[in-house]
Each structure stands twice: as structure tokens, then as C-alpha cells.
Amino acid sequence: MRILFLTNLYPPVVMGGYEIACANVARGMAARGHEVRVLTTWSHLPLPVDDPAWVHRGLDLHWHLPHRSSDATVDMRDLHSAVCSSYANTLHLLDSLRGFRPDVVYVWNLIGIGGAAMLDLLNQIGVPWVLHLMDRVPVEIASSTPACVLGLFDAQGSALYARAHIICMSQHLLDEIETMSGIIFAQGADLVPGAADVSAALPHEPYLRDGIARFVTAGAVVEHKGIDLILQASARLKAEGLAFAVGVFGDGELPCYMDMARAMQVDDRVCFLGSRTQPELMRLYAGYDAFLFPTWEREPFGFAPVEAAGCCTPPIMTRNCGASERFVDGVHCFKIERTVDDLTEAMRCVAANRADLARIGRAAQRLVATDLSFTRCLDRIEAILRAHTHPWSQAAADDPTLPLLAFLKHNLSVSLRFG
Amino acid sequence: VREPLRVAHLTPAYFSPDSVVGGGERYVYNLVQSLCTVRGFEQCVFAVGAENMLFEHNRIPVRILRNESPLPGAMDAFSAALWRDLRGFDLVHVHQSLTLFGAYTIAIVRSLGIPVVGTDLGGGENALMLGRRGLELLDGALSISRYAHDLIARYFSGHHEILIGPVNTDHFLPTAHVTRDRRTVLCVSRIMPHKGIDRVIAALPSGLRLVVAGRVYHESYYEMLRSMAEGKDVRFVHDADDTVLLELYRTAGLFVQASTARDVYGTAVAKPELMGLTTLEAMACGLPAAVSNTGALPELVPDPRFGRVFSGQDDLTAILREVAEGVWPRPDAAALARAHVVEEHGMESIGRRLAAFYRAVLARPRRSG
């Protein structure tokens, strides 16, 4: 298959699991012999020497900008370009459709590149496309754009997505999108969970070595991931005299949380260890007893706990986050309400050696090696893409007036919104 | 192409006190009626209004879509419901194509892949459609005069037809029962400076009577006209309904349309007369016409036996003197005027040519790569 990936970010520029997953799947598809092209935004970071030639970084990014303007109108213009329409990016997509002639367009995160106009273009041309949801992209598009502007792109209701095949990483995310936006995916959706490749995972070290419970968490160091809950629970455990340590991997609001840890006098127990690559983390997880994942309830899934579970490190996770659909409480993980009390009790249970960590770790590893294995998920994605591929009129992409139509829509969207 | 062809007419407003009572809105209904004289078409009119509504006008369905525009102007109205409602139509005719309504609507129709034709009825000059070449998204342009054609010709390179009219010549027709007053000069228009009514009053010789029929849209101009009319035989009729208007057409001796591109106050007027329907209606009633050389008006009177064109005050004065002296128009002018309108601008004539234009557009889609 000729697969055109469309994504806002691509390594080395990443914000989270969405972009990393996209890159993993793109590499996986290329490794399976498919002809792949990735259309994404520029990278301000040095590219790795093995950066594939099929990654085209021609799109502009209107989101995740280092500076925010004090002028609200400037911010709104950026937001408009980010979620609704960026004319240059729409033209880049058109050029890729004309030049690459994909069998299918595989759409990932669109925030930052003017998603509504791009999806509208795909619909006009009639090229088959698959949308892989790992976050509530349709909600962001619908809620950040006035209805009259959405109407230009047939994006007021579900129609913008009606021709797409939908892949979603959790029912939880699907429900959230449908509830918050009113968009209904009447065509159905394939649930493909977050996955991990544990082929290079190390054997797990003995649990509670030296009587010390070693907790780990990885990801963005921000409030919604529950870092403050971890600090509060750590303070309680310390006060109880339990022997434990917490390693926090990742970037984010590090100064804030380091200060907080110091203020709560747990800086001797909680260490902020900075970012690590995925392979590095997979090696490190083998030395920890449990993975802390007290994330917010709208977490679409969460790759890090899956990767940890794949290394026999059982996750302690929010009961109703996306990943919890795949893990059984007491079998593969420990589920908690997202409270300090619940998190403390789960950590206490581990630290006091009241949980059968080895059994749960093995079950978790088995789950990831089977249902949540990257290879198995890639098989499913490949089958879905192949099933959704159908002949399309490539002459439609060659219509010489398409740039003019996109220009008209873009400028109408701007003038309706900003006068 | 299968028949009957399903044609949707899209207009920002519809002819009604609930919407807009204007020439552009009436034109749409007239054009639809003209195509009814030809077999092989099904039509529907879509307009934008305060609420969703469906009714019939002369057995043509008229669907009103709820306005979604944040802007107050009638020509800025639009509805995204067209994405759904236009499915199944073979051709869409967007009226007022140079307005925000036109731009928004053409974007939707074009995205749906339906061949689209546009007509400027004078409601706007949207820069995206003109200078930025949005008009090139049309598969065809229908202009209501050569003048209207020339205004957009440099922005549109596709199939471009000119159809002046239609006029309902079954309604606007002379009657043998009424005697014409050859000394009555008739002006029918909104009372606004660019209509040049001041020029007619100034040129009116003794011995001729002037009847000005139209609502006042510019009070100070109207006051000026009343002042100019003192000592002359001038009557203003502000509440003429269709019956009264027809009566005026049938009883007057000459119709004058004196519109100007620069009004009495020195103000330049864009697109002063794209067509001049009242002139054609008057001529259909057998009324000879004198028109200014403004906009499309000269195109309406190609034969000096029933129509004259004046370029300035002296010209108009001379023509009215000939009328007063009985030199012009000749007795056969009424029949000639009527025959010309029926043949060139009547419902059947326009309907036939409109059908041919639509079919030509469908036969030559512009969008293939």
C-alpha cells in the first residue's frame, strides 16, 4: 500500500505518546514493505542521522508555540490556523496527494496544522482516509471554531468524519468525543489499544529489593498526570515510616514540582530524573516494583503504563482512564480512585508487601505480550488500512481549481471570524 | 445527462415583505418561471431567512434556510444546511454571486462537485470573488446585460452568457381598452439620487406631464425634486401596487429611465443599472422608452423607432421636445417595442436560451484536471 501519514508532530519533536505512536507505526509499515510518506511539520531539533527520506517536514506548526502573544486576537489567529485552516498546509497536503498518489491517507493528530480544512480537502477529493484517534481531536476542532466557520468545511456535525474509517485507542476516548462534541461516528470505530514492543525488555529484578518499594512514573510532569497526588501520597507514606522511593521521568513543570517535593519534605524519596528515550525506559522499568499512573480521568489511554506492564512492573492506575479498559484490577494492575487516599493505600499495599507483585507483574507482562503487543496492533492497523483502501478518482486531485477553492474557504473562514 | 435536470436556485433573500422586496429577488422568481416554459427541468429555490420554512411560489418549491451568518446584511446571509439540501441536484444557480452569500455558497456547491452557475444582481462586490478570482470556481456565468458581463469578464474565463430579462409579457401587455395619453411621461423607480429623476424634471417642457412612481428612499432628494417640480406638471405616486403600475404603463406616452453614474450631489455610483427591468416592462406594455446611456440601459433600446438613448441634459431635453411636438415616437412605436421585448426578453425566449445555457454548462464541466 501507498500510505500517506498526516501528523502534526514527528520525532524528534514530540509532546507525548500520540506522535511517538505515529512514528512507530510509520516505521512498522515501512518495515513491512509498504510505501510510506509522512507529511508533518518542521523540526527545530537536529534530525537523527537515520531520519527516513520519506518523512516530509513541509507543514507549518501553529500550536505549541514558545511565545504567546499578549494580544488576544493574535492568539485567536494562531488558534484558527491550528485547528481550523492553514492555507499553506492545505496546499502542502494537496501537493502530497498529487505527488504521492496514496492508496490511503492515515490521519493522526491534526491540532496545530489546520485540521478542519485538511479533512475537508480529503473529503472533496474522495481519497480513502483513516483517522487514528489518541486524543479528542474532533472535540478541539469543533469547540475552537465558530459554527458558521465550521459550516464552510461541512464540519458542523459528524459529516466531516463520515467518510473516514475511525480507529480509536479506547472506548473511553470515543465516548468522550461523542459526548463532548455531538459528533457520532455512525460508521463505527475499531478500537486499537495503546501498545508496546517488549521484545527488548529485560528480565525483572526481584521485587522490593532490600525491603524498599521502588515506584516509578514517566511522562509529562504536569498536574493532570497526577504528580501532585504522588507527592502527597509519598508524604503520607514517609510519615508512616515505610521504606520506598519514587523515580519521576519526564519533562514539564519540573521546578514547580521539585519545589513542592522539597516543601513537603519528600525530596529525599521522590527524584526527578529527567527525560529518557523509550528504549531506555524499557530497560529501567525492570528495576521498579510498580508504575504510578494516577492520571486524570480523561486520559485517552497512556502508553507508559503499558510499557511498564510489559516489563513486569504492575501499574497503579486511575480506575476509569483509557488504559483501564484493558487491565483487570488485581490481575494485571491496581486500580484506584484518583484521590490521595486511594493512591496512598495502593502504594502502602506495595510497600508493605501485601500485594503479590510477581504474579501481577507476570500477568501484566503476558497481557502486553499478547493483546497489547505492538506487532499485534500493527497487524490490525494494516488490515484496517487495507480494508479501507479503494480506488479513488485521482483526477479529482488534479482539478486545477482546488487551490482556489481552498483559498476561498480559508479566507472566508478568516474574515467571518476576524472581520 | 439524465432528464429532468434538477436545478437549484440559491438566493440570499426572497421576494417578500418578510425578506426583501427588490429587483434581484423578483428576478430570481422570474427566471425560474422562464425555465418553466421549457420541458426537462425541475427547479427549487433556496433562500435564507430567519427560520426554516417551505412554501411554493407558482408551484415551485421555495425552501428557506435559517440564517447562520453573524453579519446583519441581507446579502451576508448564508446557511451550511446546503451541504445536505443540495445533494441530488444536477446544477446550482447562485444569484448575487458577488456577495458574502455568493462566496460562502459557491464554496459549498463547488465542494459538493455540483456544476455551478453564478449571476451578479448588484448586491455586492466581494473582493474574494473578484480580485482574488473566486468567480473562476463557477462553471458558468450568466449576466443580465452586456454591461454586467463586461464588469466581471476580466475575472471569469469560463462559459459566459448574457440574458437580459425575463419579462412576464403575459402580465405586462398593452390593452386596447385604455387610451394612451401621449403627453404623459412616466418614471418608475425608487426615489434615489442615482436614478436621475431630477434630470427628467429639469428637461420637462411645458405641455408634457411627468408621473414619478416609486417609494422614497432619500428624503432630501425627494424634497429637492418637489422643489424642482414647482410650476411644472409633475405628480408623485408612492404607493403604486402592481395594478396601478400596470395602469400607468398602459396609459403613459413615454417611459424615461434617467439613471446616472454620478448623481446630482456629485456622488459616484457603482453599477448604476445592471439591467433596468422596469424599462423592459414598460416596453412590453407598448410604451416607448428614452433611457440614459448609463449601465445596461442602452442595451434595452436597440431600435430608435421605439427607444432613444440620451447622454446628457441637452439630449434629454431635445427628446422630450420631440415628444411634446409629436415628432417622436411614431404611432407604430408601441407595437415595435412590445414585439421586441416579447422576442428578445420574454419568458419563452429567455427560458429557451437559459435551458440551452444550462445544458452547455453541464456538457462542458470546467473542473476536470
Image (cartoon, coloured by chain):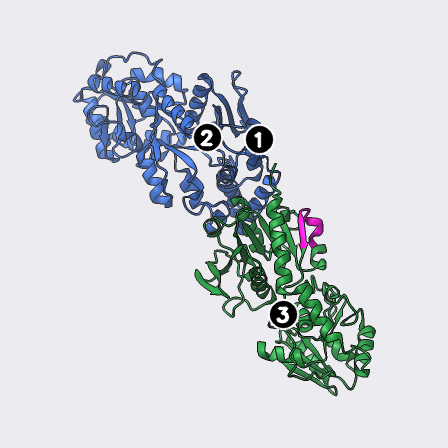
- As helix, strand or loop, the secondary structure at mark 2 comes to loop
Q: Which residue is mark 1?
A: A98
Q: Is residue B328 above or below residue A160?
A: below
Q: Is residue B197 above or below residue B268?
A: below
Left or right of A364: which side holds B304? right
What subunit carries mark 2?
A
Q: Which residue is mark 2?
A: A390
Q: Residue at x 53, y 30 (%)?
A: A41
Q: Amino acid at mark 2?
A: His
- Along the viewing direction, whichever of A279 and A29 lies nearer the viewer: A29
What subunit carries mark 1?
A
Mark 2 is surrounded, within 10 Å at the Cα level, by few (under 14), some (14 to 19) or many (20 or more) other residues, namely few
Is disc 2 in contact with disc 1, using a CB cutoff of under 8 Å? no
Left or right of B354: which side holds A192? left
Is disc 2 in contact with disc 3, using a CB cutoff of under 8 Å? no
What span is colored magenta in the figure? B151-161
- Along the viewing direction, whichever of B27 and A6 lies nearer the viewer: B27
What subunit carries mark 3?
B
Residue B351: x and y in percent read 61, 59
- As helix, strand or loop, the secondary structure at mark 3 comes to loop
Q: Quadrant of residue A357?
A: top left
Mark count: 3
Q: Quadrant of residue B288?
A: bottom right
Query: In the figure, what tint was chain B given?
Result: green
Is disc 1 in contact with disc 3, using a CB cutoff of under 8 Å? no
Q: Is residue B114 magenta?
A: no
Residue A289: x and y in percent read 26, 19
Query: In the figure, what tint was chain A given?
Result: blue
Q: Is residue B158 magenta?
A: yes
